[in-house]
């Protein structure tokens, strides 16, 4: 059984930084891709960032480019999302997910974590 556990969320002021972590356990795909998504109240879940198994391919949604960085440590089965210059519009529950392909659509990811809340005050 695959488990993804996110951590690192919290309440911060605009301009601050947070680093989210997602630890994976259990048997997933042979070379799993990882992604981060977020869902704000009253909105649909949206793609944030994704990274391939080797880290050579990364994708970001336009609104976070230059501010967020996705990375991974395969030895620790952990993916990170470094979030800098946070804005109130970044407020959401952040989910990590794993799938066979590095993709920007939620449907490509098979396993999901429970989410961690990020709140950015103005």
Image: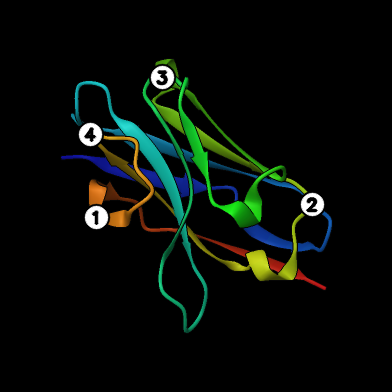
Secondary structure, mark 3, is helix
Q: Give the residue pinned by disc 3.
A: 74
Q: Which of labels 3 and 2 is toward the front?
A: 2
Secondary structure, mark 4, is loop
**Nearer-the-camera pick, 14 or 8:** 14
Tell how many labels.
4
Residues at marks 1 and 3, CA–CA distance in whole angstroms? 23 Å
Give residue 13's quadrant in the image.
Answer: bottom right
Q: Give the residue pinned by disc 4.
A: 100
Q: Residue at x 71, y 42 (%)?
A: 66
Give residue 95's quadrant in the image.
Answer: bottom left
54 lies above or below 29: above
Q: Earlier in the sequence, mark 1 or mark 2?
A: 2
Q: Give the residue pinned by disc 2.
A: 85
Q: Give the residue pinned by disc 1.
A: 107
Q: Earlier in the sequence, mark 1 or mark 3?
A: 3
The spot of residue 44 in percent (x, y) is 41, 74
The spot of residue 50 in percent (x, y) is 44, 40
Residues at marks 3 and 2, CA–CA distance in whole angstroms? 27 Å
**Nearer-the-camera pick, 32 or 118:** 32
The spot of residue 26 in percent (x, y) is 22, 32
Residues at marks 4 and 3, CA–CA distance in whole angstroms? 15 Å
Q: Earlier in the sequence, mark 4 or mark 3?
A: 3
Secondary structure, mark 2, is loop
The spot of residue 1 in percent (x, y) is 15, 40
Q: Earlier in the sequence, mark 3 or mark 2?
A: 3
Residues at marks 1 and 2, CA–CA distance in whole angstroms? 29 Å
Q: Residues within 10 Å of mark 2 (few under 14, many from 20)?
A: some
């Amino acid at each position: 059984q695959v488990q993804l556990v996110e951590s690192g969320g919290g309440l911060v002021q605009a301009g601050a930084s947070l680093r989210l972590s997602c630890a994976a356990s259990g048997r997933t795909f042979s070379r799993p891709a990882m992604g981060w998504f977020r869902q704000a109240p009253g909105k649909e879940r949206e793609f944030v960032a994704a990274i391939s198994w080797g880290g050579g391919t990364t994708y970001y949604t336009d609104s976070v480019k230059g501010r967020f960085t996705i990375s991974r440590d395969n030895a620790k089965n952990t993916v990170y999302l470094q979030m800098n210059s946070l804005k109130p519009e970044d407020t959401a529950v952040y989910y990590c997910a794993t799938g066979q392909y590095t993709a920007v659509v939620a449907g490509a990811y098979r396993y999901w974590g429970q989410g961690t809340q990020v709140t950015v005050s103005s």
